[in-house]
């Protein structure tokens, strides 16, 4: 009897212990993300998309940098040259013009040259007196001397401009080499051309002055030859022969 009652008691005790252990044991709940599955192809596509987006942003930044540099270069190209030699060039030209304008007796004027040449260097008048012939010859000589003096003055003025031109040329070359943009280089080049034009003007003025002096010398020689022929004609022209007359040397009143 006692053996029969022991088995149910043991079964009850085992059941109770198992229930207690189950109550005390932690409940294992699967995580919520257990359903997410890693897709390698999708991951690769996302990485490529992000890389392309990054490349586009990089290209845009590079484009903006290039535009900014282009604007900077345009600003440099539009910067004006902070140097001008125009005043010095104009002063050199004015000095040469003043020397030409101070030409003596026969100025550089077409009408005046024609008038004086017709009066002084044309055919010698047959009715002119000997006194008039001498006066005309002296006037022509003065014109020749004045022309030679004017030529030498122009020569001195041109030589005086050489040092000024050298200084300006050196400054302009320095400005051209240190130009920060196309506009400054162009303006420096234009001023160099202007300086060369001024030098050519000096050369033309010198040639004109020397040519004037040479022309006056040749004209004087031609007029002198014509006048010499006229004076010789007058000297050889037939006239009244020598007529002897009475000469009284002492007072014969005593």
Image (tube, grey):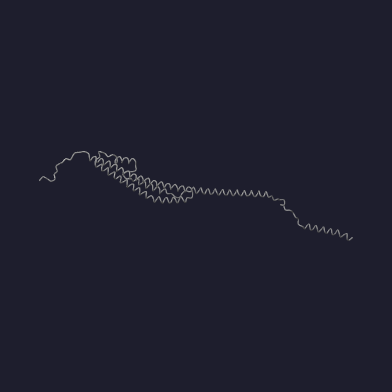
Q: Position of residue 2 (x, y in %)?
A: 88, 61
* Side (left or right) of 164 relative to 10: left
The residue sitting at the bottom extreme is 2
* Side (left or right) of 244 relative to 76: left
Quadrant placement of the N terminus: bottom right
* Side (left or right) of 81 relative to 232: right
The residue sitting at the front extreme is 236
Q: Above or below — where is 201 with respect to 14?
A: above
| Foreground pick, 239 / 67 | 239
Q: Position of residue 111 (x, y in %)?
A: 33, 40
Q: Position of residue 53 (x, y in %)?
A: 62, 48
Q: Position of residue 182 (x, y in %)?
A: 48, 48
| Foreground pick, 225 / 247 | 225
* Side (left or right) of 49 relative to 134: right
Number of marks present in the image shown: 0
The residue sitting at the left extreme is 254
């Amino acid at each position: 009897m006692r053996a029969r009652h022991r088995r149910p008691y043991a079964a009850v005790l085992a059941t109770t212990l198992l229930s207690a252990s189950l109550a005390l044991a932690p409940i294992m709940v699967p995580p919520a993300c257990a359903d997410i599955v890693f897709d390698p192809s999708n991951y690769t596509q996302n990485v490529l998309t992000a890389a392309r987006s990054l490349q586009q942003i990089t290209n845009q930044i590079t484009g903006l940098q290039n535009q900014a540099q282009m604007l900077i270069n345009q600003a440099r190209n539009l910067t004006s040259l902070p140097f001008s030699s125009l005043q010095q060039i104009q002063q050199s030209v004015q000095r040469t013009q003043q020397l030409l304008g101070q030409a003596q007796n026969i100025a550089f004027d077409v009408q005046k040259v024609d008038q004086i040449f017709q009066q002084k260097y044309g055919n010698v008048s047959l009715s002119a007196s000997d006194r008039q012939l001498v006066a005309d010859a002296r006037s022509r000589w003065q014109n020749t001397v004045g022309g030679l003096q004017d030529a030498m003055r122009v020569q001195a003025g041109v030589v005086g401009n050489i040092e000024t031109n050298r200084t300006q040329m050196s400054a302009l070359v320095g400005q051209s080499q240190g130009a920060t943009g196309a506009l400054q280089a162009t303006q420096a080049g234009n001023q160099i051309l202007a300086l060369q034009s001024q030098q050519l003007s000096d050369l033309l003025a010198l040639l004109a002055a020397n040519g004037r002096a040479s022309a006056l010398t040749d004209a004087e020689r031609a007029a002198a030859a014509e006048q010499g022929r006229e004076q010789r004609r007058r000297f050889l022209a037939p006239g009244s022969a020598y007529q002897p007359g009475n000469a009284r040397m002492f007072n014969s009143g005593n």
